[in-house]
Amino acid sequence: MAGFHVMADAQGLHVQPTVRHITTSDLWDALRLGAEDFWAKPSHYVFLCLIYPVVGLILTRWTSGSSAIQLVYPLMSGFALIGPFAAIGLYEISRRRELGMSSRWHHALDVRRSPALPSIAAIGVLLFALFLLWLFTAQSIYTSLFGAEPPASVGTFLRDVLTTGKGWTLILLGNAAGLVFAVVVLATTVIAFPLLLDRDVGAVSAIETSARAVIVNPLFAGLAVVMPVLGHATWHLYRKVVEPQDIRPIRRPM
């Protein structure tokens, strides 16, 4: 069994999978295949999809009880930043269906047996760090406009945000900052997790390949939608973007 590795592959090499340019027809085809994966056994995903509303309810209750109403929206929207990691079970199911293997709901948990699990976990930690940084940024924007005192109530907060100049400034600056975080996450992880499930290339190569895929295919900006179907579609998109065989191993600089 290969030794523990995170940044490079099991041989200590940094590989560069060849990235292809794709068209809008490829995007639609990936979405179609993702929909087929979803509708093959939609009941399997009930428990997987419940995590989103359940976490949302927990976050809302927590922020309301801790006088942090201003963080409800950043928390809910920021949860999408860890969406690529949360959807890894869907990638695994799509991978198994592609290979003609059994794809029951519990197979989503087979990711834990992947040789690339340390690399997957490392990128997951990176996404969580970005999520925390986003919350800090959102709170800083709010504090700079309204001060450190939390809103007295939900009604007061909504009135301040929707009917004042400071409120609209908060909306504009907050969404602009959120867009920056979303682009960073998209660029670094759009195909990173599917690539790691398919090939144990290491965290660095996975992130770099995702970045090159976005540079070569700017239309990836259209993937700013978080849906169970899209989770499956990301796997098929990875297949279209990354060449299956042409990989050039490069010695990792020490």
Image (tube, grey):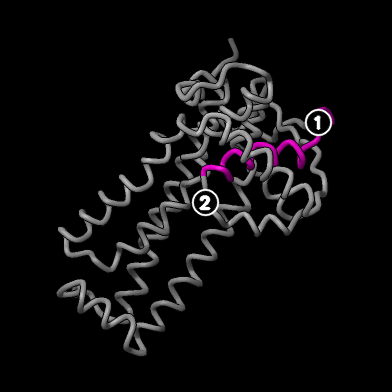
| Rendered image quadrant of residue 236 | top right
Q: Is residue 67 visible?
A: yes
Q: Amino acid at mark 1?
A: Ile
**Mark 2 or mark 1: whose residue is earlier in sequence:** 2
User: Is 204 situated above or below 106?
Assistant: below
Q: Is residue 205 visible?
A: no
Q: Nearer the viewer, residue 235 or 2?
A: 235
Callout 1: SS: strand
Residue 44 lies, in percent from the top left, at 46, 29
Residue name at image x 61 percent, y 28 percent: 197
Residue 237 is inside the magenta segment: yes
| Rendered image quadrant of residue 102 | top right
According to the image, label 1 marks what residue? 247
According to the image, label 2 marks what residue? 226
Report the magenta residues as a range: 228-247
Magenta stretch prevailing secondary structure: helix
Q: Amino acid at mark 2?
A: Val
Taking the view exactly as shown, the residue that stands out farthest to the top is 1
Quote the CA–CA distance across marks 2 and 1. Answer: 30 Å
